[in-house]
Structure formats: C-alpha cells, structure tokens
C-alpha cells in the first residue's frame, strides 16, 4: 500500500514538469514576435523592448525556463500586463471563489447523479430508468451558457428570487453551481447506473435476495457500496471538467473567479496572467486526480492487498 | 428444395454490416436523431433557399421583436430574423464539428496505432504528450490555444482538433495492444505482411467500431466546445450567424428578449443531443458485448 502511494506520488512529478514546460513555451508559441503581439499594434519600439524585457524574452530559452521555474518555486508568476500587479496577487483574490463554486457544484451533482443512477439502475428498463437516462443524456448535451442564461431569465428576471451576477453570499452561488454541475450530474448518473447494473448481476446479490433480505437493504447495503468504487474515479475526472467549465459559467454570471479572469486576460492579451492561470488549472487538476487515486486505492481491497 | 435454398440465402446475407443495420433499426431514438441530423445537413446545403429572410437582412423598423407570424423566432437588435439565422447557423456548427473531429480522429488514430503497435520509446513519448494534454482540464486547453492563435473560426477548428486527438490516440492504442497478440495479426505477420498492411488492413478495421462510436459522440461535444468559444468571444465574429455568437450578443438582452438566446441555444442543444443519441444507438448496435 505504502509502495503504491509513493509510486503514484512520484509519477506526478514528470507530468508536472511537462506541464510547466508546455505552459512556459506557451508565450513562445505565439506566431511572429510575441513581445510585439503583446504590445499591440500601436506600441512604440520602446514599449515592445520593455515588454521583451519584462517577459524575459531577450535571454536564451533554457535560461528563461530556469528563471521561470525558480520564480514559480518562490511564488513569483510575473506581473499582469493589465493591472501591473503581481499575478499571484490577482489570482489569490479570486482563487477561493472558484474553489467554492466548484465544490458546491460537485456536491450537488454527486448527490443527484448518484441518486438518479441508483434509481435508474435498480429499475432497469422501467419508466424510472427512461426518465433518469433522458435527464442524463440531456444534461450532457446542454450548453452550459444557455442553461445559465435561461436560469437567469426565469429565477432572476421573472421571479426575482436570486441575484443575476456577482458572488455575495450563498444565494449568488445557487444558479452558477446548478449551471456548472448539470452535465457532471448527468455523467455521474450514467456511470452509476451501469455500475449498479453490473453489481446487480453478481452472485452475492442473488444470495442476499435469496436469504430473504428486503429490497432496500440489498440495494443500499450491498449493491450501492460495491458499485461506488468505480464511481469515485469518475468523480475525480469530473473535477477537471468542473474546473474547465467554470470558465464559461463564471463568465455568464460575471462571477469573480479564475475562469472569468482567464477570459478577461485572453481578451486583453495579458499573457503572463493567461500562462499562470492555465498552469494553476492544470496543476489543480493533476493534484486532485492524485488524491482521487489514493482514495480509490484505500477503498479498493484489490489494490490494498498488493 | 426451396426451403433449403431459402436458408442458404438467409445465411448468405448475414454480413456484419447487414447485422449492424438490423440491430440499428431497433434503436428508435437513434433513428429519430439521425433524421434530425440529416435535416440539418439539408439546411446547411440549401439553407439560403428555404429561409424567409437573408442572414444580414437588417430591418431597423422591427428590432427586438418577439416571436410572431412574420418572424417565428423574433428578431434581434438589428431587426434580423432569428429563425433564418438559426437555420443558416447550422452550416457553421456542423462544418466546425465534423472537420475538427475528423482531423483529431485521423491524427489520434495514427498516433494510437503507431504507439500501440511499436511500443517502446515512441509509445512512451506519444503517451506522455497525451497525458500532458489531458492534464489541462476541459476547455482550458482550447482556450489556451485560442489565446495563442487569436480569434476566428479556422483557429477554433485547429484548437478543437488538438483537443480531441489525444482521446482517439488512447482508444486506438488500447485496441491495438489487444489485437497485436491476436491470432490473425500473428498470422499476417508470419505470412510476411508489412507493418503498414497489418496496421491499416488488420488492426484498424478491428478498432473501427469503437472509433465510429467515439467519433459520433465527439462531434457533439466539439460543437459544444466550439460554440462555447464563440460565446466567450474567441470564435466566430459578428455578423456571423454562428449559434454561440448569437447567444453571446443575446445575453445583453436577456431580461427583455428571451427569444434571442433561447432559440440559438435550443439549436445547439438539439444538435448535440442528436449526436449523443446517435452515438448511443451506434454503440448498442456495434458493441458485441451487449448482444449476448
């Protein structure tokens, strides 16, 4: 078990290095002269030179990468071209907002997704199953920005129950988390259903029924417990989709998180900011997957034994 | 005599394709989805001939009209007919979805075949690159690429292709790995078939059903990604009737004119839904595990 944990943690390191190289190369991928592109069409030669200096583009590439990594290790991600403040400062202001949004979306979508999946799987090919799976396939196909705008239309404009934009308090979190979590709930529902159906076929379930256990007890004690193991992995992967999806959702609700910051930065061509945000998003994703894998290992007796 | 001939004929016509058609016919929802998609294809080809108004037919006397007999889906801020623009937007979304996934599928399939078949160093390089691309959650990678390339539909196609290639590579690789050890591949090898021949004549057809299912579903999600990019201002630019862009302009009027966002969004939803349902149906008809 300990060996597995150490191995899994060590395996993350090359991925993180590759991500950092990719993100580092990011500014250098810009066609033409990146400094000129960043400066915009009206910039003077002096401005361009200054930006070249700020981005460190006048040094050899290897040197630049070394500086970049050393900076990262010291918590220095450069300066935003837009606000002229440290990138880490700007990100720090909004980081928790995105975390709150992502986690609240994950919580409701896991609860709903698992419930729908269990009822669909338990009642395979009955109306509950069709209703559940209709919800699921619709949820996967819904454009989140459309769902968000329709929710605003109904709950903020027509009924005036909830605020349209911003991040003040619990109420302003409701619509964005519904929007962000819908497709994840749908994916979890589909996955839970097939997992439940698989487990229902097992001999020990037939035994449980045969010895006269009540339906409810069999489902929740035996089927549910065993079918949740693969679902854990899917939940981990979905966390990544939530992080990515937060970009669209946050910009629909003008929610002050990392996603809306990314869009603002792209529009302003604030490359140090874009670079750092992409790095943060992917590092979070990699670390969450690591944690999920470790939880999975703790839950799954097959891995535990190795 | 007649009877035995009958049986013989019946056995003769059970080719894999016929068998697939037989199973696919039972997938009622998938067929409905297919019909809807074919309708969209017709719209994309002859759109201009059937819409009541032109895509850029400005009418400043009738701006922001609610749905009516003259304008089924209402009009936008320039008085353009939303129904016509939704119909004409089908071409863009279908073209972007199909082309980007096709490029991604071809690149990913080749990488997956090579990776799985040759193994070793080349395999670890390809898979490491895929892992790195997978480490960028969801749409983030696409946004990053758009930030480098700049806005525009052509760049959206490039970005979504890069975004979808790694998953094809993974699927094809795992299928190649299992087939590599199969008797028919070993037999072909012993007969002296070239690597190319083995890869494209023996292994690729074996992976085809998985590729087709994944391809269909991926078109749906690519249309979603592409329209999200347009919605965020990185894809199609005004005055294009692209659905995501229509939603993006409509959001300024969300309290006043719900129809400006409702109809283009519904079009995206139904199109993506149809691709997903079709993909589900194809999987059920193609998956040998489900027939048992």
Image (cartoon, coloured by chain):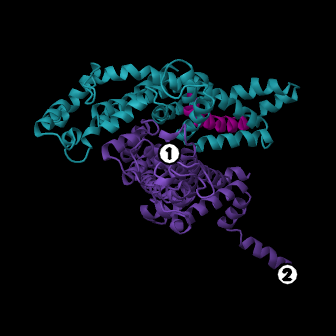
Q: Which chain is cyan?
A: A
Vertical order, A42 against A278 (above or below): below
Per the rendering, the mark at residue B247 is 1
Label 2 – label 1 distance at C-alpha: 64 Å
Disc 2 chain ID: B
Q: Position of residue A164 (x, y in %)?
A: 53, 29
Of B149 and B278, which appears nearest the observer?
A: B149
Instruction: Please name the residue that numbered disc 2 is placed on.
Output: B2
Q: Secondary structure at mark 2?
A: helix
Per the rendering, the mark at residue A208 is none
Residue drawn where x is 27% and y is 18% of the image: A74
Task: Confirm whether circles 2 and 1 share one chain.
Answer: yes
Query: Can residue B195 be seen?
Result: yes
Q: In the rendered structure, which segment of residues is drawn in magenta? A: A177-198
Q: Is residue A90 left or right of residue A31?
A: right
Q: Position of residue A75 (x, y in %)?
A: 29, 19
Q: Among all residues in the image, which is located at the extreme left?
A: A46
Please identify the dominant SS of the magenta region. Answer: helix
Q: Secondary structure at mark 1?
A: helix
Q: Give the colour chain B carries in the figure.
A: purple
Residue drawn where x is 35% and y is 47% of the image: B151
Vertical order, A62 against B123 (above or below): above
Residue A172 falls in image quadrant: top right
A241 is within the stretch colored magenta:
no
Residue B36 falls in image quadrant: bottom right
């Amino acid at each position: 078990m300990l060996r597995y944990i150490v191995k899994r943690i060590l395996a993350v390191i090359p991925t993180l290095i590759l991500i950092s190289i990719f993100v580092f190369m990011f500014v250098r991928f810009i066609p033409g002269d990146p400094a000129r592109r960043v400066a915009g069409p009206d910039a003077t030669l002096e401005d361009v030179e200054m930006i070249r200096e700020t981005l460190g583009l006048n040094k050899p590439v290897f040197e630049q990468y070394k500086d970049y990594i050393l900076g990262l290790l010291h918590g220095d991600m450069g300066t935003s071209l837009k606000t002229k403040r440290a990138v880490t400062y700007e990100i720090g202001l909004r980081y928790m907002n995105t975390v709150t949004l992502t986690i609240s979306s994950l919580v409701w979508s896991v609860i709903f997704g698992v419930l729908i999946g269990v009822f669909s799987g338990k009642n395979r090919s009955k109306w509950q199953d069709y209703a559940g799976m209709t919800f699921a396939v619709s949820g996967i196909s819904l454009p989140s920005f459309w769902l968000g705008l329709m929710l605003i239309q109904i709950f903020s404009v027509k009924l005036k129950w909830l605020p349209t934009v911003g991040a003040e308090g619990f109420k302003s979190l409701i619509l964005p988390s519904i929007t962000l979590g819908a497709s994840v709930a749908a994916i979890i529902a589909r996955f839970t259903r097939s997992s439940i159906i698989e487990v229902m076929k097992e001999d020990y379930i037939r035994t449980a029924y045969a010895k006269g256990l009540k339906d409810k007890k069999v489902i929740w004690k035996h089927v549910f417990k065993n079918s949740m193991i693969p679902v854990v992995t899917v939940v981990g992967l979905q966390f990544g989709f939530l992080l990515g999806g937060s970009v669209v959702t946050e910009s629909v609700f003008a929610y002050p998180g990392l996603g809306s910051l990314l869009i603002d930065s792209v529009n302003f061509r604030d490359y140090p900011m874009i670079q750092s945000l992409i790095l943060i998003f992917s590092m979070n994703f990699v670390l969450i997957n690591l944690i999920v894998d470790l939880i999975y290992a703790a839950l799954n007796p097959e891995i535990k034994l190795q | 005599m007649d009877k035995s001939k009958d049986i013989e004929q019946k056995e003769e016509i059970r080719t894999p394709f016929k068998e697939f058609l037989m199973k696919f016919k039972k997938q009622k929802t998938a067929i409905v989805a297919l019909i809807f998609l074919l309708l969209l294809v017709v719209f994309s080809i002859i759109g201009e001939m059937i819409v009541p108004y032109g895509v850029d037919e400005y009418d400043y006397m009738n701006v922001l009209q609610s749905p009516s007999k003259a304008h089924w889906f209402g009009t936008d801020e320039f008085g353009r007919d939303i129904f016509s623009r939704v119909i004409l937007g089908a071409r863009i979304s279908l073209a972007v979805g199909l082309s980007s996934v096709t490029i991604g599928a071809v690149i990913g399939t080749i990488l997956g075949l090579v990776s799985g078949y040759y193994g070793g160093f080349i395999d670890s390089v390809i898979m490491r690159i895929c892992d790195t691309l997978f480490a960028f959650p969801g749409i983030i990678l696409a946004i990053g690429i758009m930030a480098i390339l700049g806005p525009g539909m052509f760049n959206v196609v490039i970005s979504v292709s890069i975004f979808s290639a790694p998953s094809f590579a993974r699927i094809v690789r795992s299928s190649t790995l299992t087939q590599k050890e199969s008797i028919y591949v070993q037999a072909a090898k012993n007969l002296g078939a070239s690597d190319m021949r083995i890869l494209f004549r023996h292994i690729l057809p074996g992976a085809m059903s998985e590729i087709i299912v994944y391809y269909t579903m991926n078109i749906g999600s690519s249309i979603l990604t592409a329209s999200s990019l347009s919605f965020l201002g990185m894809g199609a630019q005004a005055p294009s009737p692209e659905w995501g862009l229509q939603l993006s302009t409509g959001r300024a009027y969300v309290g006043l004119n719900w129809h400006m966002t409702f109809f283009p969004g519904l079009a995206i939803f139904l199109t993506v839904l149809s691709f997903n349902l079709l993909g589900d149906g194809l999987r059920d008809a193609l998956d040998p595990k489900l027939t048992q």
